[in-house]
Image (cartoon, rainbow, N blue to C red):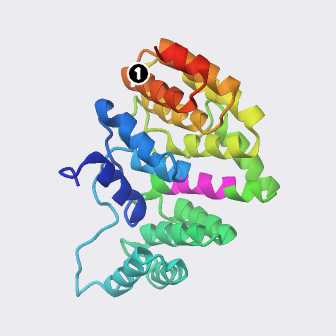
């Protein structure tokens, strides 16, 4: 995929979400990619803007592996958007072969298929099982972010427990699951769970979400640059005067050039006289 044009690579990543895909957006090309992704689901777009990692969910076919046929059938079902079949097949693999190397990842993909099929309660249950039983699963970090999406969707449906979970995980300094060690995260190790929770909170209660996002964007350390880039994207989805104020401040004052470029791009999409004047 690295040889494909950026726009094609991002589009393919969103059309075929079979492996946790992460695509690097070079600073000079970020505006075009973000523009192409603007009409798509916010969190799917954020996935496409992650850094390209290894294909953790793929294992070469092995005739000696009893899980191989189930895994391939499940992938095929997911590729053709047959989410019910994919969920059943991945779930069968995890249930029948709980000690297999693929069992933890199968739970993630079962949950993903259930989420796409709006079976949110079961998706949440699958992800909870993955966290409890398979703490070393390759897709555990992706599972954290997916859980935030699931909880956000449940909260919008009136699930009080999910709403409380979203509020708690969107807060500054919230425990994001402990799936990573200490130190400064790398470019491909942004706080996806918290960003997903913030997006859920923005959809559920923008009045509470925007002040938290402003605190995130007020950070100036290098370690939070990736988080700030994603926060800019989340803020841009909520149009209004306060959004303009936040983006203008980031465009003028953030120390990271990529964060500033993204703020400038989203300001250009607002089209107001104030934004146009600020960009001149």
Task: Please report the residue visible at 43 percent of the width from the left and 73 percent of the height from the top.
Answer: 103
Task: Please report the residue visible at 17 percent of the width from the left and 51 percent of the height from the top.
Answer: 3
Disc 1 packing (10 Å; few <14; some 14–19; many ≥20): few
Quadrant of the rendered structure where residue 226 is?
top left
Q: Toward the viewer: 24 or 37?
A: 37
Dot 1 lies on which element?
helix
Residue 21, image x, y percentages: 36, 55
Q: Does the magenta stretch mainly form a helix, a strand or a loop?
A: helix
Magenta stretch: includes residue 147:
yes
Q: Give the range drawn in magenta.
A: 143-152
Task: Please report the residue visible at 58 percent of the width from the left and 34 percent of the height from the top.
Answer: 236
Q: Mark 1 points at which residue?
A: 222
Q: In this view, does 16 lie to the left or right of 253?
A: left
Quarter containing the N terminus: bottom left
Q: Toward the viewer: 83 or 248?
A: 248
Q: Residue furthest front?
A: 273
Residue 140, image x, y percentages: 46, 56
Task: Please report the residue visible at 61 percent of the width from the left and 30 percent of the height from the top.
Answer: 173
Quadrant of the rendered structure where residue 151 is?
bottom right
């Amino acid at each position: 995929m690295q040889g494909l044009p950026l726009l094609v690579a991002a589009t393919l990543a969103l059309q075929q979400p079979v492996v946790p895909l992460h695509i690097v957006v070079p600073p000079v090309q970020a505006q075009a990619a973000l523009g192409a992704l603007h009409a798509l689901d916010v969190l799917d777009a954020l996935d496409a803007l992650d850094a390209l990692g290894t294909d953790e969910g793929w294992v070469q076919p092995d005739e000696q592996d009893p899980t191989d046929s189930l895994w391939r059938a499940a992938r095929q079902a997911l590729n053709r958007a047959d989410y019910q079949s994919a969920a059943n097949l991945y779930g069968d693999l995890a249930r029948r072969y709980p000690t297999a190397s693929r069992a933890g990842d199968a739970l993630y993909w079962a949950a993903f298929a259930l989420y796409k099929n709006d079976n949110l309660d079961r998706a949440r249950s699958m992800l909870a099982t993955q966290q409890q039983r398979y703490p070393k699963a390759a897709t555990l970090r992706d599972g954290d972010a997916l859980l935030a999406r699931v909880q956000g969707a449940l909260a919008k449906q009136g699930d009080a427990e999910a709403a409380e979970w979203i509020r708690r995980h969107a807060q500054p300094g919230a425990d994001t699951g402990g799936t990573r060690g200490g130190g400064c995260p790398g470019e491909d190790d942004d706080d996806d769970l918290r960003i997903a929770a913030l997006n859920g909170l923005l959809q559920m209660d923008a009045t509470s979400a925007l002040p938290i996002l402003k605190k995130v964007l007020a950070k100036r350390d290098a370690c939070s640059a990736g988080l700030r880039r994603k926060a800019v994207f989340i803020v841009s989805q909520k149009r209004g005067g306060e959004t303009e104020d936040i983006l203008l401040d980031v465009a003028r004052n953030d120390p990271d050039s990529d964060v500033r470029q993204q703020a400038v791009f989203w300001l250009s999409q607002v089209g107001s006289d104030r934004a146009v004047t600020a960009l001149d």
